[in-house]
Amino acid sequence: MNPGGLGSPPASVSLGHEIYALAERLFPICRSITGDGVRQTLDVLSGHIDLERHEVPTGTQVFDWTIPKEWNIRSASITGPDGQTVVDFADSNLHIVNYSLPFKGILPLEELRPHIHTLPEQPKVIPYRTSYYTPTWGFCAAHDRVANMPDGLYRVEIDAEFKDGSLAYGEYLHRGQTEREFLLSAHICHPSLANDNCSGLALLAALARSLKARETRYSYRFLFAPGTIGALAWLSRNEDRTCLIDHGLVLSCVGDAGSPAYKRSRRGDALVDRAMAHVLGRLAGAKMLDFSPYGYDERQYCSPGFDLPVGMFQRSVHGTFPEYHTSADNLDFIRPEHLEDSFRILTDVIDIIEEDWTPLNLLPKGEPQLGKRGLYAALGGQKSSGATSMSLLWVLNLADGQHSLLSMAERSNLPFKELAAAARLLSEHGLLAAAS
Amino acid sequence: MNPGGLGSPPASVSLGHEIYALAERLFPICRSITGDGVRQTLDVLSGHIDLERHEVPTGTQVFDWTIPKEWNIRSASITGPDGQTVVDFADSNLHIVNYSLPFKGILPLEELRPHIHTLPEQPKVIPYRTSYYTPTWGFCAAHDRVANMPDGLYRVEIDAEFKDGSLAYGEYLHRGQTEREFLLSAHICHPSLANDNCSGLALLAALARSLKARETRYSYRFLFAPGTIGALAWLSRNEDRTCLIDHGLVLSCVGDAGSPAYKRSRRGDALVDRAMAHVLGRLAGAKMLDFSPYGYDERQYCSPGFDLPVGMFQRSVHGTFPEYHTSADNLDFIRPEHLEDSFRILTDVIDIIEEDWTPLNLLPKGEPQLGKRGLYAALGGQKSSGATSMSLLWVLNLADGQHSLLSMAERSNLPFKELAAAARLLSEHGLLAAAS
Amino acid sequence: MNPGGLGSPPASVSLGHEIYALAERLFPICRSITGDGVRQTLDVLSGHIDLERHEVPTGTQVFDWTIPKEWNIRSASITGPDGQTVVDFADSNLHIVNYSLPFKGILPLEELRPHIHTLPEQPKVIPYRTSYYTPTWGFCAAHDRVANMPDGLYRVEIDAEFKDGSLAYGEYLHRGQTEREFLLSAHICHPSLANDNCSGLALLAALARSLKARETRYSYRFLFAPGTIGALAWLSRNEDRTCLIDHGLVLSCVGDAGSPAYKRSRRGDALVDRAMAHVLGRLAGAKMLDFSPYGYDERQYCSPGFDLPVGMFQRSVHGTFPEYHTSADNLDFIRPEHLEDSFRILTDVIDIIEEDWTPLNLLPKGEPQLGKRGLYAALGGQKSSGATSMSLLWVLNLADGQHSLLSMAERSNLPFKELAAAARLLSEHGLLAAAS
């Protein structure tokens, strides 16, 4: 009965499962903005795509910032007066404040307390905290776990290391027919948070792999870099190449059950903004948001000195869901079907950007006679001729050299795909040429 | 009691009845894109206006199209195994597929069946079908009438003729003070469909007649031509004159009880679009629709090689009402009062286009003292001074040489007529001049 | 318990009371477009601000108008057949038609009646009527008071005087760093109407006084002039200075309980329009209205020969509330708290116009590192960083030399004040310069 055959799930399900499986492998790794966790993540991704890897040494100046010392952590725990372990990094890498200083000592509860971060309003989950640029040590814990710690002396041990090392990032370039680039970027610095951003990393890798077999007009650059400092490092090293970037997307939180949401680039009317508006405009519940300078690395790409046409794609909007930046952002929070839905949206956007062109009607005076070319329902007088005929008529009518297919889709409210098919058909019949 | 006097209907009713009476005379004629039905229709219209008549010979190339052979039909019928006439062209000219090939023969039901078109979802009405450019023969019938035809042999006789002849159309030019033109066009190719388009033909003739006595700024060209091929033929023969067309309207389906609807020209902001928006904006239920390349001959006038400022006026939107393209679009479906309402709308639009001008305030610093000129309520302090004073104030305020009266109406939301009256009054008092 | 201390009302209440007290002093004076009432009003205002006073002689031509003879009135009354006083100017200066001719005589009721104006639909209030430019005499009265006057002879006495004199107005200039001006104007010609415009006069004086101590960028011109003819006189005498006016507001009816309302300047997008939109956009119920050429002296300032960027601020929209232009517009109809609310709105608008500037991000590539400057929450990963951080990010992102702080507020939907504070902070840290 199942058209896909017994036992074999339909093709579309397996794509979502593949992306999910990759996210699953990335989840346990303890990442930060520097350190071996990023390198392990790049190792895993290299199993899927041919990553070019970069190391930016500690102390390198990137614009207003300096690459910090490299941070690695082996273990961290708090042991109570009764000898019981209260909090242990081995249980969850969220238990340690990311970039925590090393520390070893025995403290009374009242001195320890300010170093433990909790979420009293969500008492069962561990918060995620970082302190990259302010030297401090600290733990994060479920509020319930640490609320009733007895007075007494606690043994604290944080076996972390700061050293002159480097910040690692990876990139992959799919070469197209031109040097003009589509930048796709995901942050690689978060530890065990599934949606934010194992989902984005895995989706980016899947997209990169899917493009391998495809001849494209644009070159596609996939960037896996630590948030902020990693994006800045890349921009700093590639400043002279940023003028090649015609389109860009930042991906994060792409695997949860929320409706897809897109935040426009700072420009607001870039082609990627319009393509995304077209795709999301046909999905119930999808949201288009105006640019704001808070979020992920679009902050850097859209800073006024670059102002690149880079938007941000996500599902549930970061900061607005209770699982955000907590241990509840785990592998149950993301699902294969949502990852796959995000994948489809992104490939639809890429298709529009690849396939957009500006046709010129070669018989612009009156309509050409479609019937004699077999392009039109032969028997007139019937009520609607259906969407395909409408697509042919719209393309012919707007093919004045001033309208790209995407602008035709915007004006006609017809799907881009139908208009692209109509333009192909009309071209084959010699009715359209490319506007120079 | 009746101010119009006993027995004589008020003037406004008789206009609607006149238009209706003309539609009534046009209704029975079997029209097509060529043939004597069009000529008979032009004969009837010539009784009302001085039509210039044209014949375009079969085989003439008009852009991508060729004038087809001329089609005329004398009779068509299906006779059943029992000798009873099942379908007869004499009952309704919709019974034959328009441009059907001639045919004479005896066929079993299963071979005849594909040649009979019905509307199962509207089983009591005859559909309207054409096959101008695909040679075939066929009938149209009420579904109920032919659903239960017994098996057996049927005699089919279609006495139609194809010959080298010509396509006929008529036009009437009302000469104005300038050569700039307002094109008004209605399709003349539909057989017995009252709203689509006996209504449009009759209304166009009434408009033409009403303009005869009027000195106008623009020249008005009234075109009665077969749909698509007729409009293309006219465009082809008048290509060098199309640059004179400043405004245009296509009329169809203007007699039914639906609210008036206007489809903007491809340009979207032509003066005729704005004038129509102003008039319809004051009528509850009236609709403004964006241009789309599906519809009537605005398709040809708005093709990208012409892009003329031509919109389309109708009442119920074609293709959306059940009577459309069926025998239910009969003389009961149109009413004098709706025809007259359409007439009023069109004359209001013409009035705006005729009377629009751009005044210049000759005392632009502060308000001129209207009171000393008797232009203002003398006793101040009263609550509102009413719309007339508002019109005076708006015209004075916007008469900076950048605003036409129509743009003043758009900004002030006052009726164009009031502003035009105010401008006339102010001109008479020497307060306005025409902006050069 | 009261932080302001027992007995002393909070500072904000006393401001409203101060403005109210001034309106109270202005209320009883019988003003008109000329005459001693205006001079007495200027005397009272001179107790608060250093008014420069002007007299424009009768007969002076101001554009299309002529300064009329000066009108003063001492007494006016109607005495009935029974010797009882029916209507007496001494009870209310609204009882006389403003600019009424003098008259002394004995008339039968039927001859007197047309000279008495009432509001039958509001039978208990005296209407306000003027007849500046049409010579006539008349009274205004509560309808109930005069509806049942017995037949008989009435003695009418209007002791008014017309003479060659002058029209008086006052202005006050607060000099700022530049000659560019902000014009604030209120009409001074209405007699005992509290909201229209004792409220506006008192508020203008309070604003002028509050600016005295402030170093401003713009110069502020406060104009107290009779409606229409006074504004025209000022424009006529200062025609060559109007090019200095960058912003302007007309004030009237600013003390009632209605929500604040602003009518845009004729330009519609002047800085004052945008600043007012920003301030009122944050107040529930506040209304933004498009320009119309009916209202107060914005009619003159926005006439096409000047087209100054002058809007009009009021609370209940003139002409729409039943108290308008009647004796019900009395001192109970205005309240200190509403006067103060209006004052706050106007100072917020002035603050925006004073403090708006266009910054340039000096580190435009990527975000500058706010943390190392102490400008950012040190501990990352927390959910929102709050509006202050958002303001910093927005200012940095939009500081491309194309966005003023106000346009940043419009785009970000953040309060101007927060963005101005952020810009100040960023400037202090050397991150912003002024765009030249």
Image (spheres, coloured by chain):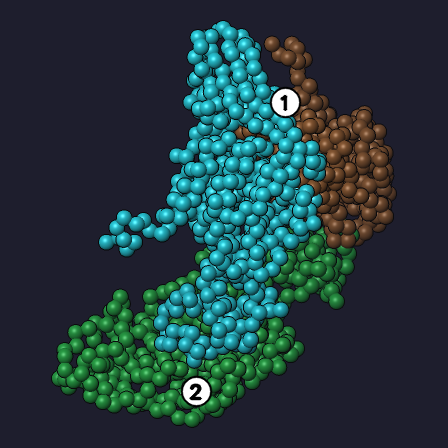
Chain colours: A green, B brown, C cyan
- What residue is shown at x 63% (from left), y 32% (from top)? C165
Q: Nearer the viewer, residue A287 or A337?
A: A287
**Residue B268 spot, x, y in % from top left:** 67, 48
User: Image check: C250 left or right of A397?
Assistant: left
Looking at the rendered structure, the kind of residue marked 1 is Pro
Q: Nearer the viewer, residue A32 or B109?
A: A32
Do the numbered discs 1 and 2 sit on residues whose CB atoms are within 8 Å?
A: no
Q: Nearer the viewer, residue A160 or B242?
A: A160
Residue most toward the top?
A: C152
C411 vs A21: above or below: above
Image quadrant occupied by the N terminus of chain C: bottom left
Judged from the image, the secondary structure of the residue bearing numbered disc 2 is loop
Image quadrant occupied by the C terminus of chain C: bottom right
- What residue is shown at x 47% (from left), y 8% (from top)? C81
* Residue topped by disc 1: C135
Chain under numbered label 2: A
Q: Quadrant of residue C129?
A: top right
* Residue topped by disc 2: A68
Q: Quadrant of residue A420?
A: bottom right
A73 vs A429: above or below: below
**Residue C114 spot, x, y in % from top left:** 56, 15
Classed neighbour count for the residue bearing mark 2: other residues with Cα under 10 Å, few (<14), some (14–19), many (≥20): many
